[in-house]
């Protein structure tokens, strides 16, 4: 993408959990696909 890159495409994964403090602990998963373009 280099210095003059004006566009970005990415994927983000995130998992949130209660660290086993309480049972059950199903947690939550998020997947985000993003695209940005600078004018």
Image (spheres, rainbow, N blue to C red):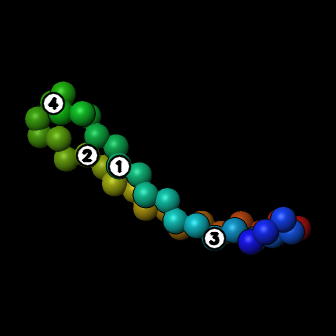
**Distance between the alpha carbons at the discs numbered 3 and 1:** 21 Å
Element class at badge 1: strand
**Distance between the alpha carbons at the discs numbered 3 and 4:** 37 Å
Contact flag, marks 2 and 1 (Cβ < 8 Å): yes
Element class at badge 4: loop
Q: Residues within 10 Å of mark 1 (few under 14, many from 20)?
A: few
Pointer 4: what residue?
Answer: 22
Say left or right for 19 vs 2: left
Contact flag, marks 3 and 4 (Cβ < 8 Å): no
**Distance between the alpha carbons at the discs numbered 2 and 1:** 7 Å
Q: Residue drawn 34% across and 43% down? A: 16
Q: Residues within 10 Å of mark 4 (few under 14, many from 20)?
A: few
Could you tell which of marks 2 and 3 lies nearer the N-terminus? 3
Compared with 14, 5 (above or below) is below
Pointer 2: what residue?
Answer: 27
- The image shows residue 15 at horizontal and vertical percentages of 35, 49
Which quadrant holds residue 4? bottom right
Pointer 1: what residue?
Answer: 15
Q: Residues within 10 Å of mark 3 (few under 14, many from 20)?
A: few
Could you tell which of marks 3 and 1 lies nearer the N-terminus? 3
Q: Quadrant of the N terminus?
A: bottom right
Q: Residue drawn 28% across and 40% down? A: 17
**Distance between the alpha carbons at the discs numbered 2 and 3:** 27 Å
- The image shows residue 10 at horizontal and vertical percentages of 58, 67
**Distance between the alpha carbons at the discs numbered 1 and 4:** 16 Å
Which quadrant holds residue 9? bottom right
Contact flag, marks 2 and 3 (Cβ < 8 Å): no
Q: Residue drawn 52% across and 65% down? A: 11
- The image shows residue 19 at horizontal and vertical percentages of 24, 33
Pointer 3: what residue?
Answer: 9
Contact flag, marks 3 and 1 (Cβ < 8 Å): no
């Amino acid at each position: 993408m280099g210095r003059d890159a004006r566009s970005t495409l990415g994927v983000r994964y995130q998992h949130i959990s209660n660290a086993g403090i309480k049972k059950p602990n199903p947690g939550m998963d998020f997947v985000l696909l993003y695209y940005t373009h600078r004018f």
